[in-house]
Amino acid sequence: MSGLLNKFVVGASVIVGMSAISVAPAFAANLTNVKFDGTDYRTYNYNTITNGVEADAISALMDGDSLTNVELAANDEMGMSRVGFSGMLNGVNVKVESVTAADWNIFGGQWLNDFSNAYSDVYNATVSIPLIGSINIGQAVAGAIQGGLARSGDANIGSFVQDDVTGEYQLSMVGHYNVLNAPYVMPMLTEELGGESLANTAMGMVNNLLGVNLEEPGGFNPLQVSEVAKVTIGDEVHYAYSFGATQTGILAADAAPGDTSSHTGLYTWTLEGQPPVAAVPEPSTMLGLMAVGGLFAAAKRNAKKA
């Protein structure tokens, strides 16, 4: 079985939709001073798709609609380039970038640990194959997903905001609502296990472990894994991903035949932050407020005398 952390291939999808979804808190600071690095990004605004147009990309990030989004490193099929945007949130410099294959050497182990915690039953599943022996099916599935995610470092970013009250950062990304339906999983699992028959066995086991849910397409609970983005806040670097999604009710406009899952899920990565410091009024403003207050007080005294 090939290694779980050493397989990096590329690919991603795009998104268009019929309705707006917002995940931003009620009182949220949006990005300012946004600038894009390079031109390899693609903006999806429902039926309108543009390549490398900064004004369109900035608009999609700041319109409050998480389904209008920007795909980073849109044409990089090997996860080699770093593409993203920088800006400010409440006076703090921030940057959101695509993830390269090299990044997985930094955070791949943590991702694998987080996946195993999120889906422990799936991750620890084993099966005995005649003439082969015991195979850890869950880890093979994780390897296939991880390989696919390494090629999905070109995350589709819907928004990046900060809660004005709590200081929490929120990054929204669009991906597969059920990663088992992602086009790349079965081919990579077939390679991981060395054959289509074992790959089908693995998929069957995972579906059985996830359990039956008649409300889900295919009758099974979804296995949810987002794409990944590199997020820098100030001088701190984070890798953003999530294992929980909400349904978007849409499908990628350019989904390949048979692809029923591209960008059907909306993922949100959050990070604790410090509440923004309240601005101190300028001395002239304070004098003005005091003068207004004095007028109201005088009016109140005169009213009592009348």
Image (cartoon, helix red, strand yellow):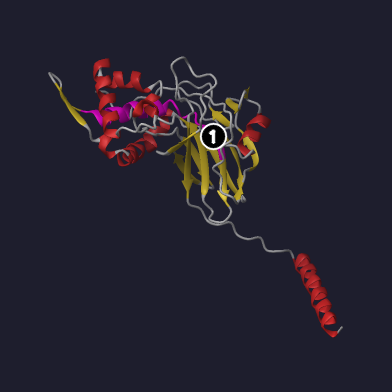
**Helix, strand or loop at disc 1?**
strand
Quadrant containing the N terminus is top left
Residue 106 is situated, as x and y percent measured from the top left of the image, at 38, 37
User: Mark 1 highlights which residue?
Assistant: 157
Residue 27 is situated, as x and y percent measured from the top left of the image, at 60, 51
Q: Is residue 145 magenta?
A: yes
Quadrant containing the C terminus is bottom right
- Horizontally, is 129 left or right of 205 in the view? left
Q: Tell me if residue 250 comes above or below residue 276 in the rendering.
A: above
Q: Amino acid at mark 1?
A: Ile
- Viewer-closest of 269 and 33: 269
Region rendered in magenta: 136-159
- Horizontally, is 23 left or right of 212 in the view? right
Residue farthest toward the bottom in the current orientation of the protein: 305
Residue farthest toward the front in the current orientation of the protein: 214
Residue farthest toward the right in the current orientation of the protein: 306
Looking at the image, can residue 85 be seen?
yes
Q: Residue at x 83, y 77 (%)?
A: 299
- Viewer-closest of 6 and 304: 304
Q: Tell me if residue 277 comes above or below residue 28 in the rendering.
A: below
Q: Residue at x 48, y 29 (%)?
A: 264
Q: Residue at x 54, y 26 (%)?
A: 15
Looking at the image, can residue 195 be seen?
no
Q: Is residue 180 magenta?
A: no
Residue 178 is situated, as x and y percent measured from the top left of the image, at 40, 30
Residue 136 is situated, as x and y percent measured from the top left of the image, at 22, 30
Q: Quadrant of residue 32?
A: top right
Q: Residue at x 59, y 25 (%)?
A: 42
Mark 1 neighbour class, 10 Å CA radius: few under 14, some 14 to 19, many 20 or more: many
Q: Tell me if residue 92 comes above or below residue 123 in the rendering.
A: below
